[in-house]
Amino acid sequence: MAKYREVPCRYYVAFGECKKGREACHKGYCQHCGKYEPRAKVRSINRKKQYNRERVGI
């Protein structure tokens, strides 16, 4: 099953609720919104690179 690496917006409350009064469907619109600010700076782990480093020993 896929793991979503989306970071919710600071202003996103719930589906259909945005503190800025925008359309709040995080899955599609929020990350393309001009007022988008991530809640936290999260580093996504690239599992493919991690696997290759461990496997090959680079």
Image (cartoon, grey):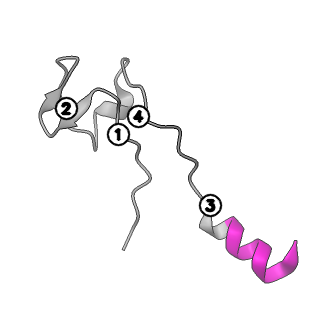
Residue at image position (38%, 18%) is 34
Amino acid of disc 3: Asn
**Dot 4 and dot 1 residues touching (CB under 8 Å):** yes
Q: Earlier in the sequence, mark 1 or mark 3?
A: 1
Q: Left of 17 or right of it: where is 32? A: right
Residue at image position (11%, 34%) is 16
| Pointer 4 residue | 39
55 part of magenta stretch: yes
Amino acid of disc 2: Ala
Tag shown at residue 8:
1
Secondary structure type for disc 2: loop
Q: Left of 32 or right of it: where is 46? A: right
Mark 1 or mark 3: which is in front?
1
| Pointer 3 residue | 46
Q: Between marks 1 and 3, how big is the CA–CA gap? A: 19 Å
Secondary structure type for disc 3: loop
Residue at image position (28%, 26%) is 11
Residue at image position (37%, 29%) is 32
- The secondary structure making up most of the magenta span is helix
| Pointer 2 residue | 24
- Measured from the top left, where is residue 43 in percent x and y? 58, 48
